[in-house]
Amino acid sequence: MKFQYQAKDINGVEKSGIIDSRSREDVLSFLSSENLYPIEIVQLVDEKDKSPLERKITLFEGVSMKEVAVFSRQLSIMIDSNVPPAEAMEALGDQTRNAFFKEKIYNIAKDVREGTQLSKAFGKYPKIFSVFYVNMIRSGEVSGNLPSILQKVASHLENEYEIKSKVTGAMMYPGIILLVFILIFVVIMIFVIPGLVGVLEEAGQELPIATRIIMAISDFFVSYWYLALIFLAGIITFFVQFPKSKTGKDFFDKLLLKIPILGNFFKSLYQSRFAENFSTLLSAGITVNEALEVVADLIGNNVYKYAILDAQKDVVKGESISVVLSRRSDIMSPLLVQMVSVGEKTGRLDSSLENVVRFYKGETDTFINSLSSIIEPLLIVGLALMVGLLVAAVLLPIYQVSTSIQ
């Protein structure tokens, strides 16, 4: 069983941690042997001992990028203030509200106290701390400059979080408009059109083709609603599961880069991500070969991933990075290639890449800020045409019926 404890030492300094023990009495014995005075002892429930409902709830547990960034910055400050890493993490664990993250922090602190390297302790939780994060920590351990490395990691994560938040915010309004239209369309098909069918059929007039199509769609929704739900569930499942497969991810990653307007935006985003990650790793003392391998896994797009891995193989053979990247002019811009070339010649590749990051960040921010103004008119025009066709298909035969009666 696992127990989380809070205690004080003879100087009144609070200590906390998680230990494996057979009983609460054994925990008390352990604290007594360490000259600690218990304040609180709480038994933690193992995953296998949880009820099925509790296990389902834990599926939604996770740690956000923002939480990791804040944790990294606070850890940097504490280590820079000469607080031992294990003690610093225990203190941060006490302040963390996310119970899932709190437990992982305590576990890392426990491993470090037992002699595990900090980077290896973080590496046990790849879903929270990425390969990039672990490599940066390892670099900080080797160079003895861990606080500075953690600050760089925190800044990097904050930049990533900011971009994701901006993209999500820009897509929110168009997404809501589209969802509302779909709901209105379904309501009209199920509740409005069936009420008009009887009136139109009694008139005995030949109905326009658009009206007959609308009536057929309405009849399908009313009579075979379960098939519509099955079809919808299948579509959702396909778009959720297929992109997770290698074939699906390859397909959608290629498609993403070919979409008009958005394709160029995503190319800028991925090149910025490549430059920032590569620059950060190089400035931390990671070798070019290792940095390229790590960046390939972090880029988030398989087209760029394969290109970077191919570049790594050629760089190992002795070719320059700029020459290798220039062969992929379809996804690597002349600006990026030129700045990499300048960095290689001056021996300041990390600084040159930082200039690339600033340029692409400006382009990305500009595009994101204008994204709503680009999508909104197109969406409104498209919805207006669809609503117009729907209304015309319904009102035209009614107008014809009323005209014939007069």
Image (spheres, grey):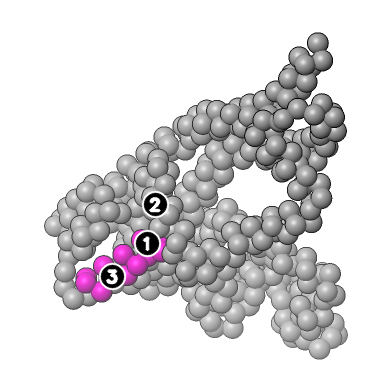
- Identify the residue position indicated by label 1 in the image: 303
Between 368 and 40, the residue placed more toward the observer is: 368
Instruction: Find out whether residue 312 is within the magenta segment.
Output: yes
What residue is rendered at 42% in x and 70% in y? 135
**What separation in Å lies between label 3 and label 2 (alpha carbons)?**
19 Å
Most prominent secondary structure in the magenta stretch?
helix
Between 303 and 311, the residue placed more toward the observer is: 303
Instruction: Find out whether residue 100 is within the magenta segment.
Output: no
Question: For the residue carrying disc 1, how many other residues have a C-alpha within 10 Å: few (<14), some (14-19), or many (20+)?
Answer: some
User: Residue at the left extreme?
Assistant: 345
Badge 3 element: helix
Badge 1 element: helix
The spot of residue 293 in percent (x, y) is: 35, 70
Q: Nearer the viewer, mark 3 or mark 2?
A: 2
What residue is rendered at 82% in x and 37% in y? 194
From this view, report whether residue 216 is shown above or below residue 287.
above
| Among the two numbered marks 3 and 2 on one chain, the one whose residue lies closer to the N terminus | 2
- Identify the residue position indicated by label 2 in the image: 257
The answer to whether the residue labelled 2 contacts the one labelled 1, judged by CB atoms less than 8 Å apart, is yes
* Image quadrant in which you'd find residue 391: top right
- Is any atom of residue 35 visible in this view? no
- Identify the residue position indicated by label 3 in the image: 310
Q: Relative to residue 185, is residue 269 drawn left or right?
A: left
Question: For the residue carrying disc 2, how many other residues have a C-alpha within 10 Å: few (<14), some (14-19), or many (20+)?
Answer: some
Residue interval drawn in magenta: 299-315
Identify the mark at residue 188; answer none if there is no mark: none
